[in-house]
Amino acid sequence: MKKLLLILILIQGVLMSSVVDKVRVKDVDVPFVFESDKNLPIVSLQIIFRNSGTLEDGELEGLARLSGKILNEGTKKLGSTEFAKKLENNAISLSFGSGKETFVITVSCLKEKINLALELMSELLQDPNFTDETLSKIKKLTMAQISKNMTNYDYIAGKELNKLMFKDTPLARGSLGTKESLEKISLEEIQNFIKKHLVLKRALVVGGGDIKIKKIKTKTAKILNLLEVGESKQLVYYPSSAKIEEKITIKDEVQQSYVYFGSRYELKYDDEDVYKATIANFILGGGGFGSRLMEEIRVKNGLAYSVYSRISFSKSSSKFSGYLQTKIESQDKAVKLVKKMIKDFTKNGVTKEELSSAKKFLLGSEPLRNETLSQRVGRSFNEYYKGFKQGHTKEVLKKIEKLTLKDLNKFIISHGEIRDLSFSIVTKNISKKNSK
């Protein structure tokens, strides 16, 4: 059965394969990754600017996110409302936004509307709604979101955990910024950020859909020609802290404890053993019901409604993390059990049955992760961005299918660093509660 699923996945990959090409503009070769798909008459295009996300905020926390938001406010000529109506009336989606490492322009539409969609993108890049009024509006909206997050206890616990794990690095800061940092951001600083980062030498184009690659490349070149050449920059890798720390945040209004935990993972995104980490974490806590953490903490001990663990391997960082919510009175017991389970996991590894179940799920659910055009385009981008050959994901599936219990357990035992957990907990002062 597993072999049949793998064959079907590989056939699907042949029918819908990616092409890596380039678009030459102003003597710069801009990489172009294309995914053909004629199932639906739609086209999508992303211009991705590397090393241009929130890691580039510098001292002005929230600068990248604010820059994306102001570009989503339409052109100065039409204004936000009229520009949005023009997009909506033609079923065009056009957005600007920043991630941790990248700044992305995304457009998607029916194939018959691609010319109009790119015209609107061109108009926006040449005439963004850079006014003090627009900046004031998006600052107010962002500050409202920041205020709302102050009662989002998952957000608080997660943010404080990042501060422990990535102290004194850009990863310790929030992407939204703070009220203080937003007040310092001027229109000129946003314009300078965009001018510095939305440039050809940082650009990577990912396109897909029901259109010929030659045609979409020609249209994309016209958009790229609006950008300056600029300068590229090497992305910095920030190792997570090896220190074991704990941060308790007291919020007297909470009704339960929000427990977030994390540790370093001495493995980088391009290490050939990353797929083993994926399987190991699926068994430990990434697989939902049936995972060890869920079975022990929820099913057997009733300490949480849900508990998960995650792994993250980006170009800028690597980490193991997880979270749960529990009764305030059960907080210490839950923390102790998490520590014990992860220690046992890194000492003894997994069973043959656990590995078999994980393989069945990961191989069997693969077609669901490759159904839509956006999923396939996203995968093609990820493979190129991380320096892998196109088709890398299919090769990983072959490795998963062949992985032995001995090799997986050897890997798990060799990464005992994940048991050096730091905790960020949002909870109530129990002594105050008992005094009422």
Image: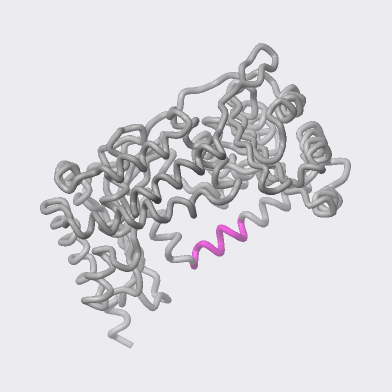
Picture residue at 59% right of the left edge, 37% below the top: 103
Q: State which region is magenta.
A: 143-151
Residue 167 seen anywhere in this rendered image of the structure: no
Q: How is the image coloured?
A: one colour
Toward which corner of the image does residue 219 lie, by quadrant?
top right
Q: Is residue 38 above or below residue 84?
A: above
Q: Is residue 377 above or below residue 237?
A: below
Residue 35 seen anywhere in this rendered image of the structure: yes
What type of secondary structure mainly makes up the magenta span?
Answer: helix
> Which one is in front, 140 or 20?
20
Q: Magenta stretch: residue 110 in it? A: no
Q: Magenta stretch: residue 146 in it? A: yes
* x and y, in percent, of residue 118 in the image: 78, 36
> Which one is in front, 362 or 62?
362
Q: What quarter of the picture does the N terminus occupy?
A: bottom left
Picture residue at 85% right of the left edge, 54% below the top: 89
Q: Is residue 269 above or below residue 347?
A: above
> Which one is in front, 420 or 284?
284
* x and y, in percent, of residue 7 in the image: 41, 44
* x and y, in percent, of residue 427 in the image: 34, 70
Picture residue at 35% right of the left edge, 74% below the top: 305
Picture residue at 23% right of the left edge, 42% below the top: 242
* 63 to the left or right of 310: right
Residue at the left extreme, as displayed: 347
